[in-house]
Amino acid sequence: MTCRHRISGLIAVGMLAFSAAGCYDGEGDALTPEEAAALAELIGRASLGPVDAQLVGSVPPGATAARSGGAKEYDFDKECSKGGSVNLSGTATFDSGEDAVRIEIDGAVRFDHCAETTDDGVTYALTGGVDHLLEVVGSFSGDVVRVEVEGSASGSVGWENLDDGSSGVCEVDVTIDVAVEVDKGAGTWEVEGGLTGTVCGISVEADAEEWLKKGWKGY
């Protein structure tokens, strides 16, 4: 375990307000709390990928997959903005009612040298991946859609800072608890909750506000 300067309080990483503190517990170069928070942003955003247009887009009343219930397998790749790709695969099980749907997502995120730049200007390439188990509840009333997501993601992720060459491998264990309410008529979003857990042995807490809006629309 390697300790670097401990930083607590709110750290602005991308569009996310993070609290991060602790000691690095992984292989290779040590991460600062700011860097662990940046990785949590990328990993968390990717973990919510299946709750994206791929699945949530088929939830509102009238959509065949959601209305008929049952299981839907998914397996798709997305290119990362700075090179490489991320694969998302698993099974989404639907249980639908008149104005609501419940989805259980049992899946995995696998990074293949997926390189992304956080809003603070640091570019990371990720390998390895996380498994996640998510429960999604969507309810609908006119133009208002509310989606609640609870779950967890854990695994081993290799990282490389493409700006300074530092790299390492460490464990990720986070929980996700967020709610999003979208008023399509008014064009507004309301977001509650966030992400908590550890990245490389460093505790992170994340307010999902702007980050989730960004990630929900496509990683």
Image: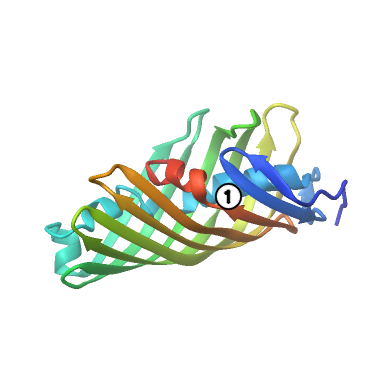
**What residue is shown at x 15% (from left), y 57% (from top)?**
63
**What residue is shown at x 32% (from left), y 64% (from top)?**
92
**What residue is shown at x 29% (from left), y 50% (from top)?**
183
Residue 155's x, y, as percent? Answer: 59, 59
Q: Which quadrant of the figure contains the C terminus?
A: top left
Q: Quadrant of residue 214?
A: top left
Question: Would residue 158 be seen by someone viewing this image from the given angle?
Answer: no
The residue under label 1 is which amino acid type? Answer: Gly
Residue 46's x, y, as percent? Answer: 48, 48
Q: Which quadrant of the figure contains the N terminus?
A: bottom right
Q: Residues within 10 Å of mark 1 (few under 14, many from 20)?
A: some
Question: Would residue 183 be seen by someone viewing this image from the given angle?
Answer: yes
Does residue 147 appear left or right of residue 151 in this picture?
left
Out of 110 and 104, give the one closest to the viewer.
Answer: 104
Q: Quadrant of residue 186?
A: top left
Q: Does residue 117 sit above or below 109 in this rendering?
A: above
**What residue is shown at x 75% (from left), y 59% (from top)?**
201
Out of 206 and 72, give the one closest to the viewer.
Answer: 206
Residue 105's x, y, as percent? Answer: 38, 65
SS at badge 1:
strand
Residue 30's x, y, as percent? Answer: 81, 45
- Identify the colour scheme used: rainbow
Q: Does residue 133 sit above or below 216 in this rendering?
A: below
Out of 59 and 9, give the one closest to the viewer.
Answer: 9
What residue did someone put label 1 on? 128
